[in-house]
Image (tube, rainbow, N blue to C red):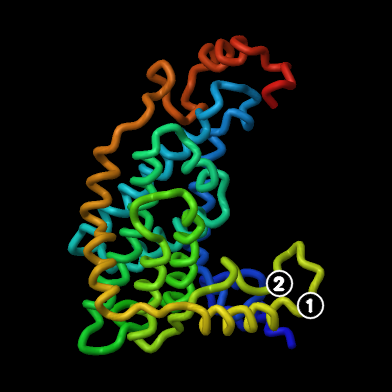
Amino acid sequence: MSTAVKDSDIQDGFICVNGHPTELWSKAAFEHVERLQIEEEKRNPDAHDMYIYNDFFGYACCDLLKTEMLAIGKLIASKTEKLALGTFHRLEALTLYMANSNGASVFPTIDVPDLAEAIYDAYGALWMTYILNLESAAKPQKLGPAHPIGIINLENAVRTSAKVITQFSDLGFDKDPEDLERAMLRVLARNDMDGTPKEKMFLGKSADSDSDEDDDEDEQMEAQSTSNNTRADDADVRAAAKSWKASAAIKALRDVGGPVELGGRSWDITQWSPAAVAAEKARFGSDDDTFF
C-alpha cells in the first residue's frame, strides 16, 4: 500500500522527496544545493562550449567542495554556530549535493589522490562531529527533534549522510566508510531514533519510476538490511569519533596540495575575461565535436 504524502501534510519549510513520509528535507538546504549547482556549472567547460583539459572539471569541483567544507568546518568550530540550525542546513545540503551531483561523481577521479581522500575524510568527519556535538548538548536528555535545537528531519538526514559515505567504499581510502556508517547509526539508535541503514539513498517512488509498489519494496529492503547489518556499539562510536574528527580533517583538507588554477585564472570560468575565453576556445576549436 502506498505511503505517499500529500502536499497539505508537509510541514512549512520542508520538501518531501519522492512522496515518501521519511524523506523530509528542508527548503533551506535545497537553497544551498541550488547555490552549489550554480557554482558547479560555472566551473564546467561543457557549459561554456569549450574543452580545457580532461581533469579540469574534476579539479574545479574539488575546489568547490573544499571551499564549502572549509566553510562548514569553520561553523562547526565556532562556539556560537556549531549547533546552529543554519549549520545543519549546510550539512544537509552537502549530503544532497554529494548524493546527486556531477561534482561528487568526478572528485574521486582526479590525479591527486590525497586531495580526493581529504574531501572524503572531511565529509564524514563534519557529520560525525556535528551529531556528537548535538548529542552532548542534549544531555541529560535524549537527542531528538526538540533537543538541543528543533531539527525535525535529523533522523533522515543522518541516515542519508551515512548512506552517502558508503558510495566511496571501493576507492581504497584508508578510513572504512562502513565503520562510520555504523557509528553514526548507533548514535541515532542510542537516542531512540531509527538507527537502521538505508537500503536506497532516497526512499519512495522516484519521478522516473513506473511502479506503484516502491514504498512497500523500500520497507521490505529496509527490514532485510536491518537483519543483515552488523550493529555498532558505543565503543565503535568512540573509535569513530577519534578517527573522524572535524578539526583534524579540516586542517588536512586545508593543507593538502592540489592543482594550480590554469594560468592563474579562477576555476570559475565566468570570472575569465572574454579574451581568455576566446583564446581557450581557439586552442582546440570551439566547433570541434571531438570535445563536446
Q: Is residue 101 shown to the viewer in this render? A: yes
Task: Say which quarter of the image contains residue 211.
Answer: bottom right
Note whether 174 is above or below 108 in the view shown: below
Secondary structure at badge 2 equals loop
Instruction: Report the amino acid beneath label 2.
Output: Lys
Q: Is residue 39 shown to the viewer in this render? A: no
Residue placed most toward the observer, 283 or 229: 229
Please name the residue that numbered disc 2 is placed on.
205
Residue occupying image coordinates x 37% and y 43%: 66
Which sits earlier in the primary sequence, circle 1 or circle 2?
2
Instruction: Report the amino acid beneath label 1.
Output: Asp
Tell me where residue 191 appears, x and y as whole percent: 34, 85
Residue occupying image coordinates x 39% and y 38%: 113
Distance from label 1 to label 2 (Cα)?
A: 7 Å
Residue occupying image coordinates x 52% and y 80%: 228
Residue occupying image coordinates x 58% and y 82%: 224
Q: Residues within 10 Å of mark 1 (few under 14, many from 20)?
A: few
Task: Say which quarter of the image contains residue 132.
Answer: bottom left
Q: Which residue lies most toward the left here?
A: 79
State the quadrant of the C terminus.
top right
**Badges 1 and 2: C-beta atoms under 8 Å apart?**
yes
Please name the residue that numbered disc 1 is placed on.
212
Residue placed most toward the observer, 267 or 241: 241
Tell me where residue 216 appears, x and y as whole percent: 69, 83
Note whether 260 is above or below 36 in the view shown: above
Tell me where residue 156 appears, x and y as whole percent: 48, 74
Tell me where residue 266 appears, x and y as whole percent: 42, 26
